[in-house]
Image: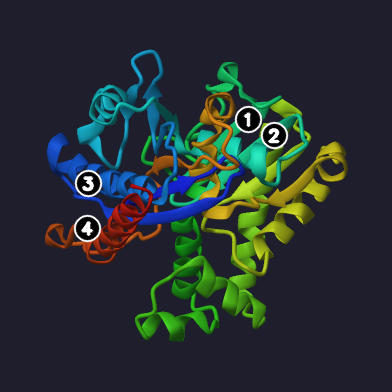
Amino acid sequence: MSRATIALVDRHGRVHHRLYAKTLWGRPVAATLEPYLRAIEIMLAYASAEGFHVCGLGVSVPGSLDSSLRRPLLVPTLPALNGFPLCDLLEARYCLPTQLHVDVDAAVVGEYRFGAGKGFRRLLFLSVNAVVGAAFLVDGKLEPSAQQYVGHVCHITVSANGSRCSCGKRGCINTLVSIDAMQKMVQRALRRGEETSLSQRLSNREYFSPRLLAEEALQGDSVALQVYSELGRWLAAATARYISIFDPNIFILAGSVLDPSDLLLTQLRTALIAHSSTQVGTTIEVVPALLASDAALIGMAVPFLASDVRRSARPTVPLADVVHAEQDDQPRQAGDVLDDVYPVQADVVNQQTHRRKSYQRRIG
């Protein structure tokens, strides 16, 4: 991941303000956390200047957690945070209650409270990005008993004859359903000499992405359409396994592999209907995530909402929500840290501080 998103979220699930802090790679824990902590402080200053009451910090990380100690257990992209007492540090530094969640768990909570899962009892959430992640929610609560199946499930076998995975097995979901898998399908087609307009675009040094693939599929490119068909087939096989285990009322699909034209979602629905389990295709709603990339941001605010109502009668009480939501896959230089944040945000804070002092003078 290359940057974190820091957002101010209110009790209605609205993001009032956001900013970004860059990720520093291969650094010790203090250097790793520095840009995130400085960005949090900018956001807290902004909230104070605007008169918002911040009642908690929510932190979302990709990987796994030690829930009893409230610290990351394994964060593959930022190993410096493995085992670090993150919640204790933030609570001591900012005197605010802090909660830590896996990113996909936060996302399904957000979708349940404010998104596509609102009104459903049993939610199955699948996120497909560089790897595959899943979460299952029943009556608003994550199912801890299902952790052997959900979470980051990129190593569940879907095809015994599939490509070999980094874990040593063959046919893991991550080798068949991911951005990397899509790119490999295109590369294999190019090596076979199949005619496709993708070859010209990639030879012009365009960066491969789901959007590029979707654009060519909408133009009728046979290779692009073949990739979506294959991806939908494997995704349906993986989804069917989850559905048979959890019996959800709704299946929510999220991640960067979803394109604006819903090609993958259409392929998935078609493949599920054709699956051997007719119940999968007829009784389960398959929908895209309504909150998109904001799902985890908003989901991290949800645990604070009940206490927020008791503590304050204000119509909205924004929350400082710190989540490592990735927007950019390209690493940046360490010297550029916080260039996206400070030049603009410092001015905002200065303006708000001046406004607050003027107000105090008026009422004083």
Q: CA distance from mark 1 to mark 4?
A: 35 Å
Given the image, on which type of amino acid does mark 4 rest? Leu
Residue displayed at 59% across by 59% down: 258
Q: Which circle, 2 or 3, is nearer the viewer?
A: 3
* Mark 4 vs 2, N-terminal side: 2
Q: Which circle, 3 or 1, is nearer the viewer?
A: 3
332 horizontally vs 233: left or right: left
Given the image, on which type of amino acid does mark 1 rest? Phe
Q: Is residue 157 visible?
A: no
Residue 263 to residue 246: above or below: below
Residue 343 or residue 148, whichever sits in front: 343
Q: How many marks?
A: 4
Give the image location of residue 328, x and y in percent.
36, 60
Given the image, on which type of amino acid does mark 2 rest? Leu
Q: CA distance from mark 4 to mark 3?
A: 9 Å
Q: Which dot marks residue 38?
A: 3
Q: Which circle, 4 or 3, is nearer the viewer?
A: 3
Q: Decide: marks 1, 4 in contact (CB < 8 A)?
A: no
* Residue furthest out toward the front: 364
Q: Which circle, 4 or 2, is nearer the viewer?
A: 4
* Mark 2 vs 1, N-terminal side: 2
Q: Is residue 279 visible?
A: yes
List the residue tagged with mark 1.
136
Q: Decide: marks 2, 1 in contact (CB < 8 A)?
A: yes
Q: Which dot marks residue 338?
A: 4
* Mark 3 vs 1, N-terminal side: 3
